[in-house]
């Protein structure tokens, strides 16, 4: 587990967690089958990743016959919030304004995206 109880996931672990959040519990065979043709993960790679994620406190398993059924023990929303905070601190020194300014200057936004951003900012202003 990372410092202060935070769990840091690699890109590959995020992919695996995304699958487990949508399909849990899942066996090693089901995980390997799901990622077949998408990644080069074989059974041994999946087992190694699951062990590493179990040690981090991200997943756990229950025995069901001869198979282990893996499931997430961290929530998607909590993990996304932590990853976003870490990204904001690492790349923009914690400045949400700097991140938004950079994005607005670099990206062409659709009208619907700008309206959604405006709505989110208004909600934040009312809540905070």
Image (cartoon, rainbow, N blue to C red):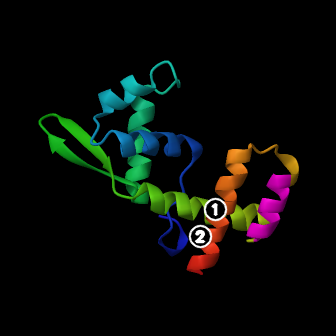
User: Residue, x 42% and y 50% (percent of image)?
Assistant: 53
The disc at residue 6 is none
Q: How far across and how far down the image is residue 75, in percent?
A: 40, 58
The disc at residue 123 is 2
Quadrant assignment, res 66: top left
Q: Nearer the viewer, residue 109 or 75?
A: 109
User: Residue, x 58% and y 44% (percent of image)?
Assistant: 11
Residue labelled with disc 1: 119
Q: Farthest residue to the right: give it.
A: 105
For marks 2 and 1, give the CA distance: 6 Å
Please determine whether, in this image, residue 58 is positioned above or below residue 1: above
Q: How far across and how far down the image is residue 52, in percent?
A: 44, 49
Label 2 with label 1: CB-CB less than 8 Å: yes
Which secondary structure, mark 1? helix
How packed mark 1 is, by other alpha carbons closer than 10 Å (few <14, some 14-19, many 20 or more), is few
Q: How far across and how far down the image is residue 39, in percent?
A: 53, 25
User: Residue, x 32% and y 33% (percent of image)?
Assistant: 28
In screen coordinates, is 40 left or right of 88?
left
Q: Nearer the viewer, residue 23 or 7?
A: 23
Q: Nearer the viewer, residue 58 or 118?
A: 118
How packed mark 2 is, by other alpha carbons closer than 10 Å (few <14, some 14-19, many 20 or more), is few
Q: Farthest residue to the left: give it.
A: 65
Prevailing SS of the magenta stretch: helix
Residue stretch in magenta? 95-104
Which secondary structure, mark 2? helix
Please determine whether, in this image, residue 49 is positioned above or below residue 81: above
Q: How far across and how far down the image is residue 32, in percent?
A: 39, 27
Q: Does the magenta run of residues contain 68?
A: no
User: Residue, x 62% and y 60% (percent of image)?
Assistant: 84
């Amino acid at each position: 587990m990372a410092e202060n109880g935070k769990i840091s996931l690699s890109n590959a672990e995020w992919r695996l967690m995304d699958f487990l959040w949508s399909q849990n519990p899942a066996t090693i065979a089901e995980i390997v089958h799901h990622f077949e043709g998408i990644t080069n993960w074989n059974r041994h790679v999946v087992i190694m990743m699951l062990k590493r994620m179990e040690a981090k406190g991200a997943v756990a398993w229950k025995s069901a016959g001869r198979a282990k059924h893996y499931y997430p023990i961290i929530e998607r929303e909590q993990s996304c919030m932590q990853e976003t905070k870490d990204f904001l601190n690492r790349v923009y020194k914690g400045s949400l304004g700097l991140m938004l300014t950079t994005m607005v200057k670099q990206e062409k936004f659709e009208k619907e995206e700008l309206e959604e951003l405006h709505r989110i900012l208004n909600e934040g202003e009312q809540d905070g």
